[in-house]
Protein backbone atom coordinates (compact mmCIF):
# COMPACT_ATOMS: atom_id res chain seq x y z
CA UNK A 1 0.00 0.00 0.00
CA UNK A 2 2.85 2.35 0.90
CA UNK A 3 6.50 1.94 0.04
CA UNK A 4 8.93 4.51 1.21
CA UNK A 5 12.57 4.34 0.31
CA UNK A 6 15.50 6.42 1.57
CA UNK A 7 13.48 9.63 1.92
CA UNK A 8 15.30 12.81 2.85
CA UNK A 9 13.79 16.15 3.70
CA UNK A 10 15.34 19.30 5.04
CA UNK A 11 13.95 22.75 5.76
CA UNK A 12 16.38 25.54 4.93
CA UNK A 13 19.45 23.45 5.65
CA UNK A 14 18.06 21.67 8.72
CA UNK A 15 17.62 17.96 8.04
CA UNK A 16 14.29 16.75 9.38
CA UNK A 17 14.06 13.32 7.73
CA UNK A 18 17.23 11.40 6.97
CA UNK A 19 16.86 8.21 4.96
CA UNK A 20 13.39 7.01 5.93
CA UNK A 21 12.43 3.60 4.56
CA UNK A 22 9.54 1.25 5.33
CA UNK A 23 6.67 -0.65 3.77
CA UNK A 24 3.06 -0.93 4.78
CA UNK A 25 0.90 -3.79 3.55
CA UNK A 26 -2.82 -3.77 2.86
CA UNK A 27 -5.11 -3.85 5.85
CA UNK A 28 -2.62 -3.16 8.60
CA UNK A 29 -2.41 -0.41 11.15
CA UNK A 30 1.04 1.07 11.00
CA UNK A 31 2.16 3.32 13.83
CA UNK A 32 4.87 5.92 13.59
CA UNK A 33 6.04 6.46 17.11
CA UNK A 34 8.25 9.34 18.09
CA UNK A 35 8.60 12.33 20.38
CA UNK A 36 7.39 15.76 19.40
CA UNK A 37 9.62 17.28 16.75
CA UNK A 38 10.79 13.90 15.46
CA UNK A 39 9.37 14.57 12.00
CA UNK A 40 6.10 12.61 12.13
CA UNK A 41 3.90 15.34 10.69
CA UNK A 42 6.51 16.10 8.04
CA UNK A 43 6.50 12.44 6.98
CA UNK A 44 2.68 12.33 6.77
CA UNK A 45 2.72 15.46 4.63
CA UNK A 46 5.21 13.80 2.30
CA UNK A 47 3.24 10.55 2.12
CA UNK A 48 0.06 12.46 1.29
CA UNK A 49 1.64 14.63 -1.35
CA UNK A 50 1.29 17.88 0.59
CA UNK A 51 5.02 18.41 0.78
CA UNK A 52 7.80 17.74 -1.70
CA UNK A 53 10.83 15.80 -0.50
CA UNK A 54 14.49 16.16 -1.43
CA UNK A 55 15.56 12.62 -2.19
CA UNK A 56 14.27 9.04 -2.26
CA UNK A 57 11.01 7.55 -3.47
CA UNK A 58 7.50 7.33 -2.07
CA UNK A 59 4.98 4.95 -3.60
CA UNK A 60 1.39 5.17 -2.38
CA UNK A 61 -1.45 3.05 -3.83
CA UNK A 62 1.13 1.63 -6.27
CA UNK A 63 1.94 5.03 -7.75
CA UNK A 64 4.64 7.61 -7.21
CA UNK A 65 3.05 10.01 -4.75
CA UNK A 66 3.63 12.98 -7.04
CA UNK A 67 1.63 11.35 -9.82
CA UNK A 68 -1.49 10.51 -7.79
CA UNK A 69 -4.57 11.68 -9.67
CA UNK A 70 -7.63 13.36 -8.20
CA UNK A 71 -9.43 10.05 -8.53
CA UNK A 72 -6.66 8.26 -6.55
CA UNK A 73 -6.90 10.86 -3.83
CA UNK A 74 -10.55 9.93 -3.34
CA UNK A 75 -9.43 6.64 -1.85
CA UNK A 76 -7.25 8.42 0.70
CA UNK A 77 -8.49 10.02 3.92
CA UNK A 78 -6.33 12.40 5.91
CA UNK A 79 -6.63 13.91 9.37
CA UNK A 80 -3.80 16.28 10.20
CA UNK A 81 -2.83 17.46 13.67
CA UNK A 82 -5.06 20.52 13.35
CA UNK A 83 -8.61 19.48 12.69
CA UNK A 84 -9.73 22.07 10.19
CA UNK A 85 -13.44 22.27 10.95
CA UNK A 86 -15.70 25.18 10.06
CA UNK A 87 -16.38 26.60 13.50
CA UNK A 88 -19.61 28.39 12.71
CA UNK A 89 -21.21 25.56 10.76
CA UNK A 90 -22.99 22.63 12.35
CA UNK A 91 -21.48 19.14 12.24
CA UNK A 92 -23.86 18.17 9.47
CA UNK A 93 -23.10 21.29 7.42
CA UNK A 94 -19.39 20.68 7.89
CA UNK A 95 -19.78 17.19 6.48
CA UNK A 96 -22.08 18.35 3.68
CA UNK A 97 -19.27 20.47 2.26
CA UNK A 98 -17.08 17.42 1.92
CA UNK A 99 -19.88 15.10 0.86
CA UNK A 100 -20.45 17.49 -2.05
CA UNK A 101 -16.77 17.66 -2.91
CA UNK A 102 -16.41 13.88 -2.89
CA UNK A 103 -19.76 13.30 -4.56
CA UNK A 104 -21.05 11.29 -1.59
CA UNK A 105 -24.85 11.24 -1.13
CA UNK A 106 -25.98 13.30 1.87
CA UNK A 107 -27.73 10.22 3.19
CA UNK A 108 -24.39 8.87 4.30
CA UNK A 109 -23.69 11.78 6.64
CA UNK A 110 -26.01 10.52 9.36
CA UNK A 111 -24.60 7.00 9.40
CA UNK A 112 -21.05 8.34 9.43
CA UNK A 113 -21.84 10.58 12.39
CA UNK A 114 -23.30 7.59 14.20
CA UNK A 115 -20.23 5.56 13.42
CA UNK A 116 -18.02 8.05 15.25
CA UNK A 117 -20.48 8.48 18.12
CA UNK A 118 -21.80 11.90 17.11
CA UNK A 119 -25.26 10.67 16.19
CA UNK A 120 -26.97 13.19 18.45
CA UNK A 121 -24.67 16.14 17.83
CA UNK A 122 -25.33 16.67 14.13
CA UNK A 123 -27.09 20.00 14.53
CA UNK A 124 -24.56 21.39 17.01
CA UNK A 125 -22.31 24.15 15.81
CA UNK A 126 -18.70 22.99 15.65
CA UNK A 127 -17.56 25.82 17.91
CA UNK A 128 -19.45 24.24 20.81
CA UNK A 129 -17.78 20.83 20.50
CA UNK A 130 -15.31 19.45 23.02
CA UNK A 131 -11.87 18.38 21.86
CA UNK A 132 -12.91 14.74 21.75
CA UNK A 133 -15.98 15.56 19.69
CA UNK A 134 -13.88 17.59 17.29
CA UNK A 135 -11.67 14.58 16.74
CA UNK A 136 -14.78 12.54 16.04
CA UNK A 137 -16.07 15.13 13.59
CA UNK A 138 -12.73 15.13 11.79
CA UNK A 139 -12.78 11.35 11.72
CA UNK A 140 -16.28 11.45 10.26
CA UNK A 141 -14.99 13.72 7.52
CA UNK A 142 -12.12 11.33 6.86
CA UNK A 143 -14.36 8.25 6.78
CA UNK A 144 -17.27 9.69 4.84
CA UNK A 145 -15.99 8.95 1.36
CA UNK A 146 -14.92 5.44 2.44
CA UNK A 147 -11.20 5.75 1.74
CA UNK A 148 -9.17 2.55 1.77
CA UNK A 149 -6.02 4.29 3.00
CA UNK A 150 -6.28 6.52 6.07
CA UNK A 151 -3.67 8.84 7.58
CA UNK A 152 -4.18 10.05 11.13
CA UNK A 153 -1.73 12.49 12.67
CA UNK A 154 -1.80 12.09 16.46
CA UNK A 155 -5.52 11.32 16.58
CA UNK A 156 -5.63 10.97 20.35
CA UNK A 157 -3.15 13.54 21.54
CA UNK A 158 -4.54 15.59 24.39
CA UNK A 159 -7.59 13.41 24.99
CA UNK A 160 -8.66 11.86 28.28
CA UNK A 161 -8.19 8.08 28.62
CA UNK A 162 -11.85 7.26 28.16
CA UNK A 163 -12.27 9.29 24.98
CA UNK A 164 -8.98 7.83 23.79
CA UNK A 165 -10.35 4.31 24.20
CA UNK A 166 -13.46 5.23 22.24
CA UNK A 167 -11.36 6.64 19.42
CA UNK A 168 -9.28 3.44 19.45
CA UNK A 169 -12.44 1.42 19.05
CA UNK A 170 -13.46 3.49 16.05
CA UNK A 171 -10.03 3.06 14.47
CA UNK A 172 -10.10 -0.70 15.03
CA UNK A 173 -13.54 -0.91 13.43
CA UNK A 174 -12.12 0.79 10.34
CA UNK A 175 -9.39 -1.81 10.22
CA UNK A 176 -12.03 -4.53 10.34
CA UNK A 177 -13.65 -2.94 7.33
CA UNK A 178 -10.38 -3.52 5.52
CA UNK A 179 -8.83 -0.06 5.64
CA UNK A 180 -5.10 0.42 5.83
CA UNK A 181 -4.26 2.94 8.52
CA UNK A 182 -1.13 4.99 9.05
CA UNK A 183 -1.11 6.81 12.35
CA UNK A 184 1.41 8.77 14.32
CA UNK A 185 1.53 8.97 18.08
CA UNK A 186 3.83 9.64 20.96
CA UNK A 187 1.84 7.33 23.17
CA UNK A 188 3.44 3.91 23.34
CA UNK A 189 0.52 2.16 24.96
CA UNK A 190 -1.64 3.29 22.12
CA UNK A 191 0.89 2.01 19.58
CA UNK A 192 1.13 -1.31 21.40
CA UNK A 193 -2.60 -1.74 21.53
CA UNK A 194 -3.58 -0.58 18.05
CA UNK A 195 -0.75 -1.20 15.68
CA UNK A 196 0.20 -4.32 13.78
CA UNK A 197 3.55 -2.77 13.16
CA UNK A 198 5.33 0.27 14.50
CA UNK A 199 8.38 2.27 13.54
CA UNK A 200 10.24 4.24 16.16
CA UNK A 201 11.25 7.60 14.76
CA UNK A 202 13.88 9.73 16.41
CA UNK A 203 15.43 12.87 15.01
CA UNK A 204 14.39 12.01 11.48
CA UNK A 205 15.57 8.41 11.41
CA UNK A 206 13.76 5.14 12.03
CA UNK A 207 15.68 3.49 14.83
CA UNK A 208 13.60 0.30 14.99
CA UNK A 209 10.59 -1.21 13.30
CA UNK A 210 8.48 -4.36 13.53
CA UNK A 211 5.47 -5.62 15.44
CA UNK A 212 5.30 -4.20 18.97
CA UNK A 213 5.72 -7.68 20.50
CA UNK A 214 8.70 -8.43 18.28
CA UNK A 215 10.44 -5.23 19.25
CA UNK A 216 9.85 -5.75 22.94
CA UNK A 217 11.10 -9.35 22.73
CA UNK A 218 14.19 -8.25 20.89
CA UNK A 219 15.10 -5.90 23.71
CA UNK A 220 14.29 -8.40 26.39
CA UNK A 221 17.88 -8.27 27.67
CA UNK A 222 16.66 -5.20 29.45
CA UNK A 223 14.42 -7.37 31.56
CA UNK A 224 14.72 -6.67 35.26
CA UNK A 225 13.18 -8.06 38.38
CA UNK A 226 11.68 -5.68 40.85
CA UNK A 227 11.70 -6.68 44.49
CA UNK A 228 9.60 -4.95 47.08
CA UNK A 229 11.24 -5.47 50.44
CA UNK A 230 9.50 -5.62 53.78
CA UNK A 231 11.54 -2.57 54.76
CA UNK A 232 9.49 -0.69 52.19
CA UNK A 233 12.42 -0.36 49.82
CA UNK A 234 12.21 -1.22 46.08
CA UNK A 235 15.23 -2.75 44.39
CA UNK A 236 15.73 -3.58 40.72
CA UNK A 237 17.80 -6.64 39.90
CA UNK A 238 18.93 -7.29 36.32
CA UNK A 239 18.48 -10.70 34.65
CA UNK A 240 22.00 -11.94 35.13
CA UNK A 241 23.70 -15.09 36.30
CA UNK A 242 24.53 -13.63 39.68
CA UNK A 243 21.03 -12.37 40.36
CA UNK A 244 19.56 -15.70 41.39
CA UNK A 245 21.84 -15.83 44.43
CA UNK A 246 20.91 -12.35 45.54
CA UNK A 247 17.25 -13.17 45.26
CA UNK A 248 17.48 -16.50 47.06
CA UNK A 249 19.52 -14.89 49.85
CA UNK A 250 16.93 -12.14 50.30
CA UNK A 251 14.18 -14.72 50.06
CA UNK A 252 15.63 -16.96 52.76
CA UNK A 253 16.18 -13.90 54.96
CA UNK A 254 12.47 -13.28 54.59
CA UNK A 255 13.02 -9.69 53.44
CA UNK A 256 10.94 -9.91 50.27
CA UNK A 257 7.35 -8.85 50.17
CA UNK A 258 6.62 -9.08 46.43
CA UNK A 259 8.48 -9.96 43.22
CA UNK A 260 7.67 -8.49 39.81
CA UNK A 261 9.33 -9.14 36.54
CA UNK A 262 9.32 -6.12 34.29
CA UNK A 263 9.52 -6.70 30.55
CA UNK A 264 10.60 -3.88 28.26
CA UNK A 265 7.84 -1.74 26.84
CA UNK A 266 8.04 0.31 23.67
CA UNK A 267 8.76 3.18 26.00
CA UNK A 268 11.84 1.61 27.55
CA UNK A 269 13.05 0.32 24.19
CA UNK A 270 12.82 3.84 22.84
CA UNK A 271 14.67 5.15 25.84
CA UNK A 272 17.40 2.57 25.40
CA UNK A 273 17.79 3.30 21.69
CA UNK A 274 17.77 7.05 21.86
CA UNK A 275 18.30 8.10 25.44
CA UNK A 276 15.09 10.12 25.05
CA UNK A 277 11.68 9.77 26.54
CA UNK A 278 8.73 9.67 24.16
CA UNK A 279 6.70 12.10 26.16
CA UNK A 280 8.92 14.90 27.26
CA UNK A 281 8.12 16.01 30.79
CA UNK A 282 7.36 19.68 30.64
CA UNK B 1 -16.49 24.76 -11.37
CA UNK B 2 -18.57 22.41 -9.23
CA UNK B 3 -16.10 22.87 -6.39
CA UNK B 4 -16.41 26.65 -6.65
CA UNK B 5 -20.17 26.32 -6.30
CA UNK B 6 -19.69 24.13 -3.22
CA UNK B 7 -17.49 26.85 -1.73
CA UNK B 8 -20.13 29.49 -2.48
CA UNK B 9 -22.79 27.33 -0.85
CA UNK B 10 -20.64 26.89 2.23
CA UNK B 11 -20.02 30.64 2.43
CA UNK B 12 -23.70 31.44 2.14
CA UNK B 13 -24.40 29.18 5.11
CA UNK B 14 -21.58 30.82 7.01
CA UNK B 15 -22.57 34.42 6.26
CA UNK B 16 -25.36 34.86 8.78
CA UNK B 17 -23.19 33.49 11.57
CA UNK B 18 -20.04 35.40 10.66
CA UNK B 19 -20.51 38.78 12.31
CA UNK B 20 -17.26 40.39 11.17
CA UNK B 21 -18.05 39.70 7.55
CA UNK B 22 -21.77 40.30 7.84
CA UNK B 23 -21.33 43.80 9.24
CA UNK B 24 -19.05 44.67 6.34
CA UNK B 25 -21.76 43.69 3.91
CA UNK B 26 -24.67 45.53 5.49
CA UNK B 27 -23.10 48.58 7.16
CA UNK B 28 -22.99 50.94 4.19
CA UNK B 29 -26.23 49.91 2.50
CA UNK B 30 -28.07 50.46 5.78
CA UNK B 31 -26.27 53.74 6.48
CA UNK B 32 -27.14 54.95 3.00
CA UNK B 33 -30.82 54.22 3.46
CA UNK B 34 -30.84 55.98 6.80
CA UNK B 35 -28.85 59.06 5.82
CA UNK B 36 -30.58 59.65 2.50
CA UNK B 37 -33.94 59.58 4.21
CA UNK B 38 -33.05 61.35 7.42
CA UNK B 39 -30.79 64.18 6.40
CA UNK B 40 -31.79 66.94 3.99
CA UNK B 41 -29.57 70.01 3.93
CA UNK B 42 -30.11 72.83 1.45
CA UNK B 43 -27.41 73.08 -1.17
CA UNK B 44 -26.15 69.56 -0.59
CA UNK B 45 -25.46 67.76 -3.85
CA UNK B 46 -28.10 65.30 -4.93
CA UNK B 47 -27.59 61.76 -3.61
CA UNK B 48 -24.53 62.93 -1.69
CA UNK B 49 -24.57 60.05 0.78
CA UNK B 50 -25.42 57.38 -1.78
CA UNK B 51 -22.40 58.31 -3.87
CA UNK B 52 -20.03 58.76 -0.97
CA UNK B 53 -21.03 55.57 0.83
CA UNK B 54 -21.06 53.58 -2.38
CA UNK B 55 -17.41 54.37 -2.93
CA UNK B 56 -16.55 53.60 0.68
CA UNK B 57 -18.44 50.33 0.31
CA UNK B 58 -16.31 49.49 -2.73
CA UNK B 59 -13.11 50.31 -0.85
CA UNK B 60 -14.01 48.42 2.31
CA UNK B 61 -16.41 45.51 2.13
CA UNK B 62 -14.86 43.29 -0.58
CA UNK B 63 -11.33 44.02 0.59
CA UNK B 64 -11.84 43.18 4.25
CA UNK B 65 -14.19 40.25 3.75
CA UNK B 66 -12.07 38.45 1.15
CA UNK B 67 -8.89 38.95 3.17
CA UNK B 68 -10.61 37.85 6.36
CA UNK B 69 -12.22 34.75 4.82
CA UNK B 70 -9.03 33.50 3.18
CA UNK B 71 -6.80 34.18 6.17
CA UNK B 72 -9.28 32.58 8.57
CA UNK B 73 -9.39 29.43 6.47
CA UNK B 74 -5.61 29.34 6.55
CA UNK B 75 -5.42 29.89 10.28
CA UNK B 76 -8.07 27.28 11.08
CA UNK B 77 -6.51 24.82 8.66
CA UNK B 78 -9.76 24.34 6.75
CA UNK B 79 -8.11 25.49 3.54
CA UNK B 80 -5.62 22.66 3.78
CA UNK B 81 -8.43 20.21 4.34
CA UNK B 82 -10.11 21.50 1.18
CA UNK B 83 -6.97 21.20 -0.93
CA UNK B 84 -6.39 17.71 0.45
CA UNK B 85 -9.88 16.89 -0.80
CA UNK B 86 -8.56 17.95 -4.18
CA UNK B 87 -10.18 21.37 -4.36
CA UNK B 88 -7.82 23.37 -6.58
CA UNK B 89 -6.64 26.73 -5.25
CA UNK B 90 -8.16 28.60 -8.21
CA UNK B 91 -11.50 26.85 -7.65
CA UNK B 92 -11.43 28.02 -4.06
CA UNK B 93 -10.49 31.60 -4.94
CA UNK B 94 -13.13 31.73 -7.68
CA UNK B 95 -15.74 30.56 -5.19
CA UNK B 96 -14.79 33.11 -2.53
CA UNK B 97 -14.37 35.93 -5.06
CA UNK B 98 -17.69 35.32 -6.72
CA UNK B 99 -19.49 34.91 -3.43
CA UNK B 100 -18.24 38.25 -2.10
CA UNK B 101 -18.93 39.95 -5.42
CA UNK B 102 -22.46 38.59 -5.43
CA UNK B 103 -23.25 39.69 -1.88
CA UNK B 104 -21.77 43.13 -2.50
CA UNK B 105 -23.88 43.50 -5.62
CA UNK B 106 -26.96 42.86 -3.50
CA UNK B 107 -25.71 45.60 -1.17
CA UNK B 108 -25.24 47.88 -4.17
CA UNK B 109 -28.76 47.06 -5.28
CA UNK B 110 -30.05 48.30 -1.92
CA UNK B 111 -28.00 51.47 -2.18
CA UNK B 112 -29.33 52.10 -5.69
CA UNK B 113 -32.88 52.53 -4.46
CA UNK B 114 -32.51 56.32 -4.34
CA UNK B 115 -31.33 56.57 -7.94
CA UNK B 116 -33.46 57.27 -10.99
CA UNK B 117 -34.42 54.06 -12.80
CA UNK B 118 -32.38 54.81 -15.90
CA UNK B 119 -29.26 55.45 -13.80
CA UNK B 120 -29.35 52.11 -12.01
CA UNK B 121 -27.67 49.89 -14.63
CA UNK B 122 -24.84 52.36 -15.03
CA UNK B 123 -24.43 52.64 -11.27
CA UNK B 124 -24.34 48.86 -10.85
CA UNK B 125 -21.76 48.55 -13.61
CA UNK B 126 -19.48 51.04 -11.86
CA UNK B 127 -19.93 49.20 -8.59
CA UNK B 128 -19.27 45.83 -10.21
CA UNK B 129 -15.96 47.07 -11.60
CA UNK B 130 -14.99 48.53 -8.24
CA UNK B 131 -15.89 45.36 -6.33
CA UNK B 132 -13.82 43.26 -8.70
CA UNK B 133 -10.69 45.36 -8.22
CA UNK B 134 -11.16 45.37 -4.44
CA UNK B 135 -11.71 41.62 -4.36
CA UNK B 136 -8.41 41.09 -6.13
CA UNK B 137 -6.70 43.36 -3.60
CA UNK B 138 -8.31 41.48 -0.72
CA UNK B 139 -7.26 38.15 -2.21
CA UNK B 140 -3.65 39.37 -2.45
CA UNK B 141 -3.69 40.24 1.24
CA UNK B 142 -5.35 36.94 2.15
CA UNK B 143 -2.78 35.01 0.18
CA UNK B 144 0.11 36.89 1.75
CA UNK B 145 -1.01 36.60 5.37
CA UNK B 146 -0.54 33.55 7.48
CA UNK B 147 -3.39 34.31 9.88
CA UNK B 148 -6.24 36.71 10.51
CA UNK B 149 -4.18 39.02 12.69
CA UNK B 150 -1.69 39.69 9.94
CA UNK B 151 -4.46 40.10 7.40
CA UNK B 152 -6.25 42.68 9.54
CA UNK B 153 -3.10 44.67 10.10
CA UNK B 154 -2.46 44.89 6.35
CA UNK B 155 -6.11 45.47 5.45
CA UNK B 156 -6.48 48.47 7.76
CA UNK B 157 -4.11 50.94 6.05
CA UNK B 158 -4.99 49.72 2.55
CA UNK B 159 -8.68 50.09 3.28
CA UNK B 160 -8.13 53.60 4.66
CA UNK B 161 -6.50 54.66 1.42
CA UNK B 162 -9.09 53.07 -0.85
CA UNK B 163 -12.17 53.98 1.13
CA UNK B 164 -11.35 57.38 2.58
CA UNK B 165 -9.20 59.15 0.04
CA UNK B 166 -12.19 60.02 -2.20
CA UNK B 167 -13.86 61.67 0.77
CA UNK B 168 -10.73 63.53 1.86
CA UNK B 169 -10.14 64.56 -1.74
CA UNK B 170 -13.41 66.50 -1.63
CA UNK B 171 -12.01 68.78 1.05
CA UNK B 172 -8.38 69.04 0.10
CA UNK B 173 -6.86 69.93 -3.26
CA UNK B 174 -3.45 68.36 -2.69
CA UNK B 175 -4.95 65.08 -1.51
CA UNK B 176 -7.04 65.09 -4.65
CA UNK B 177 -3.88 65.30 -6.76
CA UNK B 178 -2.59 62.05 -5.29
CA UNK B 179 -5.95 60.36 -4.80
CA UNK B 180 -6.85 60.64 -8.45
CA UNK B 181 -4.47 57.77 -9.19
CA UNK B 182 -6.54 55.45 -7.04
CA UNK B 183 -9.42 53.57 -8.62
CA UNK B 184 -11.93 54.50 -5.95
CA UNK B 185 -11.41 58.22 -6.62
CA UNK B 186 -11.91 57.67 -10.33
CA UNK B 187 -15.06 55.68 -9.64
CA UNK B 188 -16.24 58.55 -7.47
CA UNK B 189 -15.67 61.03 -10.30
CA UNK B 190 -17.54 58.83 -12.74
CA UNK B 191 -20.32 58.31 -10.29
CA UNK B 192 -20.75 62.03 -9.67
CA UNK B 193 -22.00 62.29 -13.25
CA UNK B 194 -23.79 58.96 -13.48
CA UNK B 195 -23.64 58.90 -17.27
CA UNK B 196 -21.23 57.52 -19.81
CA UNK B 197 -20.82 61.06 -21.12
CA UNK B 198 -19.05 62.09 -17.96
CA UNK B 199 -16.30 59.49 -18.30
CA UNK B 200 -13.01 60.96 -19.34
CA UNK B 201 -10.21 59.08 -21.05
CA UNK B 202 -7.74 59.67 -18.23
CA UNK B 203 -10.26 58.22 -15.78
CA UNK B 204 -10.58 55.05 -17.82
CA UNK B 205 -6.80 54.86 -18.11
CA UNK B 206 -6.32 55.08 -14.37
CA UNK B 207 -8.99 52.42 -13.81
CA UNK B 208 -7.38 50.09 -16.30
CA UNK B 209 -3.96 50.64 -14.79
CA UNK B 210 -5.32 50.00 -11.29
CA UNK B 211 -7.08 46.83 -12.41
CA UNK B 212 -4.02 45.60 -14.29
CA UNK B 213 -1.78 46.27 -11.30
CA UNK B 214 -4.12 44.31 -9.03
CA UNK B 215 -4.25 41.40 -11.45
CA UNK B 216 -0.47 41.32 -11.72
CA UNK B 217 -0.07 41.60 -7.96
CA UNK B 218 -2.60 38.82 -7.51
CA UNK B 219 -0.77 36.45 -9.83
CA UNK B 220 2.58 37.26 -8.23
CA UNK B 221 1.11 36.54 -4.80
CA UNK B 222 -0.57 33.38 -6.02
CA UNK B 223 2.51 32.04 -7.80
CA UNK B 224 4.77 32.83 -4.90
CA UNK B 225 2.64 31.64 -2.02
CA UNK B 226 -0.17 29.57 -3.52
CA UNK B 227 -2.57 28.90 -0.69
CA UNK B 228 0.03 27.63 1.76
N1 LIG C 1 7.63 24.24 7.27
C1 LIG C 1 8.68 24.05 8.09
N2 LIG C 1 9.75 24.88 8.03
C2 LIG C 1 10.82 24.69 8.83
N3 LIG C 1 10.93 23.71 9.73
C3 LIG C 1 9.92 22.84 9.84
C4 LIG C 1 8.74 22.96 9.02
N4 LIG C 1 7.90 21.96 9.36
C5 LIG C 1 8.51 21.26 10.32
N5 LIG C 1 9.72 21.78 10.62
C6 LIG C 1 10.68 21.25 11.61
O1 LIG C 1 10.78 19.87 11.40
C7 LIG C 1 10.89 19.17 12.64
C8 LIG C 1 9.87 18.07 12.68
O2 LIG C 1 8.58 18.63 12.74
P1 LIG C 1 7.28 17.74 12.74
O3 LIG C 1 7.29 16.88 11.54
O4 LIG C 1 6.13 18.66 12.90
O5 LIG C 1 7.45 16.87 14.05
P2 LIG C 1 6.38 15.99 14.84
O6 LIG C 1 5.14 15.96 14.03
O7 LIG C 1 7.03 14.65 14.98
O8 LIG C 1 6.20 16.65 16.14
C9 LIG C 1 10.73 20.19 13.74
O9 LIG C 1 12.00 20.47 14.26
C10 LIG C 1 10.17 21.39 13.03
O10 LIG C 1 10.65 22.56 13.62
MG1 LIG D 1 3.21 16.58 14.58
Image (cartoon, coloured by chain):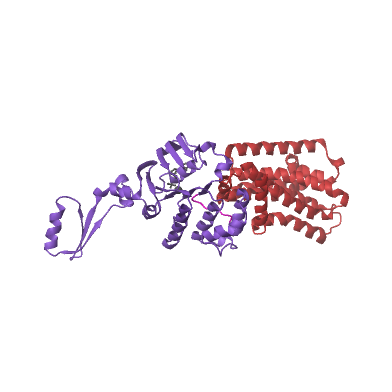
Chain A: its colour in the image is purple
| The chain coloured red in the image | B
Q: Magenta segment, principal secondary structure?
A: loop
Q: Nearer the viewer, residue B102 or A1?
A: A1
- Residue A93 in the image: x percent, y percent? 62, 57
Q: Is residue A155 left or right of residue B168?
A: left
Farthest front residue in view: A177
Give the answer, above or below, for where A160 lies relative to A11: below
Q: Is residue B108 above or below residue A70?
A: below
* B187 falls in the magenta region: no
Left or right: where does residue A191 sit relative to residue B225?
left
Q: Residue at x 56, y 63 (%)?
A: A121
Q: Position of residue A27 (x, y in %)?
A: 45, 48
Task: Report if residue A282 is visible in the image.
Answer: no
Image quadrant holding the C terminus of chain A, namely bottom left
Span shown in magenta: A80-86
Amino acid sequence: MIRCNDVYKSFSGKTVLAGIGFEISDGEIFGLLGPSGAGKTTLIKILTGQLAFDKGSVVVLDKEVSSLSGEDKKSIGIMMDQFGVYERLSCIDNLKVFADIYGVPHGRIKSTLEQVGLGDAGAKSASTLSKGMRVRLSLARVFMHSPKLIFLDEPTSGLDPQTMRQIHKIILEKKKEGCTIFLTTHNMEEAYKLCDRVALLNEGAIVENGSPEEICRKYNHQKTIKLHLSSGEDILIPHENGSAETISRLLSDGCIETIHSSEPTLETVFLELTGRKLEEDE
Amino acid sequence: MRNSLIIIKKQLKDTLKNKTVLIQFILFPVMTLIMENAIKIDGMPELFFTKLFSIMYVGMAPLTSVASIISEEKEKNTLRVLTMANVKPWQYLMGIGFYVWFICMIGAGVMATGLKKEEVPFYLLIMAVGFSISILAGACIGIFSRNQMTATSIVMPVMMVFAFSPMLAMFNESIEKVARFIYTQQLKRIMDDVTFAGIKADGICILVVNATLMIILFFIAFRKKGLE
